[in-house]
Image (tube, rainbow, N blue to C red):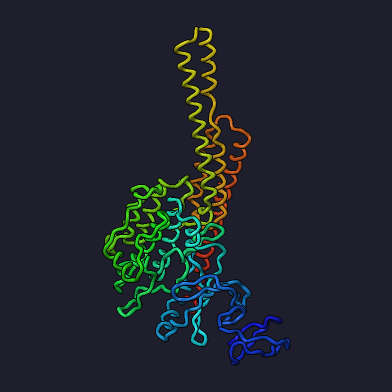
Amino acid sequence: MRFQCSFCSSIVSTDLPPKTRLECASCGHSCFVPATPFEENCVIGDFVIGEEIGAGSIGKVYHAVQLSLGREVALKILSPELSSSKFIDSFLHEARAAAQLSHTNLVQAYAVGEENGVCYLAMSYIKGETLSDRLEREKRIPVDEALHIAQQVAEALFYAWDDSRLIHRDVKPDNIMITTDGIVKLTDMGLAITQEDWNADAEISGSPSYMSPEQFAGEELDCRSDIYSLGITLYQMISGKLPFVGESFQEIASQHFNEEPVPLYRFNVGATLKVSNLVKKMMEKLPEDRFQNYDVLLKSLWNLRHVTAPDSSLIPDIHTVSIHHLDYGLQKKSYKNIVSTQKKVKQLKNRRDILFWTLVTIFPVPIVVLLVFLLVMESAREPDITGVYETKMQVLALRCGSSEFLLPKLKEQAGKLLADLKEIKQPTLRQELLLWQVRYYIKHIENQQLKNELRDQRIMLENNNKKIFNKKQN
């Protein structure tokens, strides 16, 4: 066993029994051998174990520190009862495959290893909470935000499938993290398996409430199995309830095969028929009846969110999820600005209607002239839409600061905002400032496009020079 001395932080290695007193060779202080290899300050591989921060179906997760780099990690340690040689080989193989993945919506795996029969997987340490914790606190999540979370999880699953044909096999709220910055990250790729590594003898893994029928049956899996599990998760987010609940594995499995869940639109949670049908399609019993791939699912989510989102301009495009799109505070602020403007427009129309009917019905000619003047003045007024434009300017600025947006699309969005601002006949000082800001960001985008073009030309020239040099060498 290895552990860190509590006095000098040096690493102590010993074969003495647990709770035995020994003297640290570095500082001379007496310390006790930990009771188990997984207590705080114990060392496994390159990691010093800290407090336990979670537990899953195959092991526990600890807050740990990587000795060589001094960075915080989340360290998953495989349960000792699962430490058969077959399971260890499978775990290490699949965890190494998952460690090759890097995506905004995936928890990055740093290292995987085995020491004295104990398997571990080190991942990036995420500051935030699990979707399960949030559901426990809030019971359910508003419809569009639930779709928003599902969209990001689908992006992570798409990347894992498209890059390595990886199937997660355990998509559920416990394995979905929401960071303090609002990014959704899929974690626990330890159960993931590549499609080519599946075989009839593969162990049935996963959490019963979220497993697909084919997963229960031990049949060959593909991406549609994870789509089913994500559908169950989305159903739970919106309704606050699991579609299938039982007291035993067999009872839950039977429901997945034979029972239809209560449609979401029947719950009083604001889910429309279209939302209900999308989730239903994700949860179809037969894989061929579900969405056949992530592109089709993501497109359906994207289209649906243009109906459900407070401000559709803030919805991330497919395969371009960015931190700035995940700011629901910005969504709500934009929505309030739009609603406020709509109310002002309605108030102006009501006042104009009152003036018109008063003019027509009861007043003599001299007063009619006055009312006509007031009507003209009232019609010349425009509602204050500066708040809406300022929100759009904030979104544009945030997107310009992100590396995940395509520059031509950014330029198109900036151009539309500039055109809207130029249509204002007598701009206020705030609107003049917005005009200046938009022009600045358009110039910034054009400069960045030019830099990219020059970089591409330089790379092309270097490659051509290398080819010419190689030909001369040969």
Q: Residue furthest front?
A: 247
Tell me: 108 left or right of 299.
right
Residue 104 shows in this picture: no
The residue at 48%/51% (across/down) is: 408
| Nearest the eye: 430 or 157 | 157
The residue at 36%/53% (across/down) is: 300
| Nearest the eye: 400 or 184 | 184
Q: Quadrant of residue 8?
A: bottom right
The residue at 65%/85% (across/down) is: 11
Q: Quadrant of residue 260?
A: bottom left
The residue at 39%/71% (across/down) is: 206
Q: Position of residue 301 (x, y in %)?
A: 39, 53
**Vertical placement of residue 5 versus 326, above or below:** below
Q: Position of residue 248 (x, y in %)?
A: 35, 70
| Nearest the eye: 110 or 6 | 6
Q: Position of residue 303 (x, y in %)?
A: 38, 50
